[in-house]
Amino acid sequence: MTTAQEAITAGRTALGIEFGSTRIKAALIGPDHKPIATGSHDWENQYVERLWTYQLEAVWEGLRDCYAKLAADVWQRYGVRLARVGAIGISAMMHGYLVFDADDRQLVAFRTWRNTNTAEAAARLTELFGHNIPLRWSIAHLGQAVADREPHVRQVAYLTTLAGYVHWQLTGEKVIGVGDASGMFPIDTKLGGFNQQMVAQFDTLVSERGLGWRTADILPKVLVAGEAAGKLSEEGARLIDPSGTLLPGVPLCPPEGDAGTGMVATNSVAPRTGNVSAGTSIFAMIVLERELSRVYPEIDLVTTPSGELVAMAHCNNGASELNEWCGAFAEFAAALGVGADTGKVFETLFNKALEGEPDAGGLLAYNYLAGEPITGLAEGRPMFWRSADSRFTLANFMRAQLFAAFATLRLGMDILAPEGVQLDSMFAHGGVFKTPVVAQRFLAAALKAPVAVGDIAGEGGAWGIALLASYLVNGGSRPLREYLAEEVFANAVLETISPDPQDVAGFDAFTDRFSAGLAVQRAAIQVP
């Protein structure tokens, strides 16, 4: 038997499953922390009654399909059935609003991070707490539902995230990892757990409604990386694998959000490190050495999975519009009878962008499919426009689309400059970096800092949560940062690109144009 076969048979593996915005992905890792099998399932959110949502049935259908593909991959590669797993971790897109009554019945459809209907509550809570509460945070959703006098709020018995929900159904434990929890409600990084002063303030704020519950009673218990978070129940095992092959009793690590798993997957959990995750949304995380001097509405304060304070610049809109344009070009190629696979289309168009002028030839693009809090937009309108004297070439067009994917992130990161935030390393991951050099080079120009990408970029958060599951059973007393540095990344091969001065100057010019053109975005959202 091979080493991988032995690990699978003996259950010396860790399984990570992450529910991303467009894909559910599973990664099984061996004792050396390298992936030995993967599985995935594509899914999409729906826009129903002006709210972005996923049906919970789709959660379980996607999980079963994803796991079945992973188990099939194990069988195809190693000729053994996947029955034993050493540890499991569940991760998902952060924030949002999943509420249940005392009988564990879902009260309203899942409201995802993408919704921006919570502006009134977010602003009020930010002022009340003296702590930035972004529109997508769970407490903003709850506060808005209370303010709107939605009938269901009196019945709320439990509020959690998508990762917390799946973990609960698999184990029976109403717990959550501190990183995911920090996207629900502010965390007290000194004492751990939710900030009790702010919990009391929220209770006072809503007390006049006579809701019949206290905030502390409806939130999950907060755990840090390495703490036991329950075991896979018989029912939970069947939810994952209806065939009955997967055995129950597997320990689970605390469920985490995609921001936390991105930090782990890029070894960015120590102060002065950071990472950028680019997908449907795009965000940058920087682990801080100290608290910021004041509240910045554009900057989230969250934590690593082990509880260190992190500044997050989160953009609701990432690579989705870029994907749409690449899809349109793929259709055109097919119509000409010279169709190519999707990967080849992306690679060709991305590399074409390297031939563009530094500032994309005066072209301007917006990737705003949804509202964008950093630029103060409640809704979005994807746009491409140009002036009469701009240079409209394919190279400039693709460069503009790629620049647009990073432009709002740049605006958010500029806010941290006066705080003296220092970075020793910035890692990047996500599908947009699968084509070598291109997106990495443009991101370096946007951030004006070196950007590293490793061979782990394609595995992303599913690998990150698998590492946290492994840390649960193998970490011992070592801090997470030491475990990752010594056991996982000691021999990691990373490709680092430093900012090119011409790219920086071009991105600066594009950003100025992008900022000035926001007036057009604001006018566009007034049109039905």
Image (spheres, grey):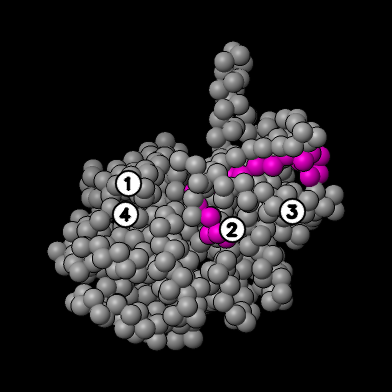
User: Are there few (<14), some (14-19), or many (20+) residues within 10 Å of tag 3?
Assistant: few
Quadrant location, the C terminus: top left
Q: Height in image: 190 above or below 44?
A: below
| Left or right, residue 180 beside residue 232 | right
Q: Which residue is mark 3?
A: 512
Q: Earlier in the sequence, mark 2 or mark 4?
A: 4
In the picture, the disc for residue 110 is 4
User: Are there few (<14), some (14-19), or many (20+) residues within 10 Å of tag 4?
Assistant: some
Callout in the foreground (4, 1): 1
Q: Residue at x 22, y 57 (%)?
A: 106
From the viewer's side, name the closer residue of 356 and 496.
356
Q: Are marks 4 and 1 in contact (CB under 8 Å)?
A: no
In the picture, the disc for residue 49 is 1
What is the CA distance from the residue labelled 4 to the residue labelled 1? 12 Å
What is the CA distance from the residue labelled 3 to the residue labelled 2? 13 Å
Disc 1 residue type (three-letter): Glu
What is the CA distance from the residue labelled 2 to the residue labelled 4? 25 Å
Seen as rendered, the residue at the extreme top is: 337
| Left or right, residue 463 beside residue 252 | right
What is the CA distance from the residue labelled 1 to the residue labelled 2? 24 Å
Q: Which residue is mark 2?
A: 375
Q: Earlier in the sequence, mark 3 or mark 1?
A: 1
Disc 3 residue type (three-letter): Asp
Residue 399 coordinates in the image, percent (x, y): 72, 40
Dot 1 falls on a residue whose secondary structure is loop
